[in-house]
Amino acid sequence: MSQARQQLAEQLAEAVFQGLQEDLNHQERVLLVVSGGSTPVPFFKALAAKPLPWDRVDVTLADERWVDEQSSDSNAKLVREHLLQGEASAATFIPLTCSAATPEEGVDEVAKQAESLAWPASVVILGMGGDGHTASLFPDSPELTLALATEELLVAVRTPSQPQPRITFSADRLHQARRHILHITGEDKRAVLAKALNGDDVRQLPIRAFLTCPLAIYWAP
């Protein structure tokens, strides 16, 4: 991995550490919402090393593929292997799947578990795909309109561009966080972000749903 990306991961871990500490000074528990994929792995490792009172930290995902937690496609597996290590294993982690066969059948059960987290989130860390999606808000998803508009906690999502069905927090629930961070790497993602900043059709590039709230952007080539 490039030195720039490693540095970025460490700067991001420091910013998240500061944000969580700040909120822990005046509340019992805090919530961190993270994203999956390969980009956050070095950040997860850097954050796990921070001296937080991890037993007072709740962690969940912005979205998840509806797969078994042992699957290599599982974001929960990624979080367990890279973030919930050492002292950080004391954090309370709520995954976004259950034993139901489909996200449509399981969404209510997962929502019940997720409601118990320390909302509003202290920090939400978003990623972004080359198609401008963030969380599981995909431009080609039939559920996009619902996920952007509903006050429900979670939405089951199917999208032609993705092999697995998914579950995602609604834009509304993610918006309510105290701090929003976008963590991206590579020139291609920077070009997508530039395009997103130059227009306002959220359906075309759903990351635009978060460009209206203060968003800290962490990018490295």
Image (spheres, rainbow, N blue to C red):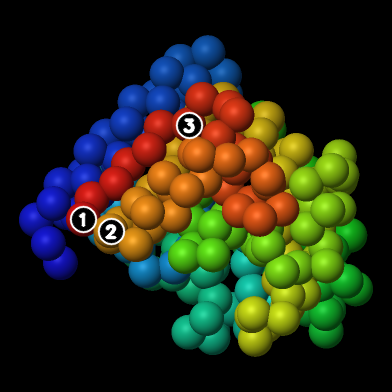
Residue receiving disc 3: 215
Farthest-out residue, top: 26
| Residue 199, horizontal then vertical, whole percent | 58, 40
Q: Quadrant of residue 156?
A: bottom right
Residue receiving disc 2: 187
Residue at image location 57% in from the left, 48% down from the top: 207
Q: Can you say whether 84 is above or below 7 in the image?
A: below
The crowding category of the residue bearing disc 2, from other C-alpha atoms within 10 Å (few below 14, some 14 to 19, many at least 20), is: few
Q: Earlier in the sequence, mark 2 or mark 3?
A: 2
Q: Nearer the viewer, mark 2 or mark 1?
A: 2
Q: Can you say whether 28 is above or below 116 in the image?
A: above
| Residue 161, horizontal then vertical, whole percent | 64, 80
Farthest-out residue, front: 198
Q: Can you say whether 193 is above or below 51 in the image?
A: below
Query: Could you tell me if residue 158 is visible in this image?
Result: yes
Residue 221: numbered disc: 1
Residue at image location 57% in from the left, 19% down from the top: 27
The crowding category of the residue bearing disc 3, from other C-alpha atoms within 10 Å (few below 14, some 14 to 19, many at least 20), is: some
Pointer 2 and pointer 1: residues touching (CB < 8 Å)?
Answer: yes
> Disc 2 to disc 1, how far (Cα)?
6 Å
Helix, strand or loop under label 1: loop
Helix, strand or loop under label 3: strand
Q: Quick one: 194 or 116, which is closer to the camera? A: 194
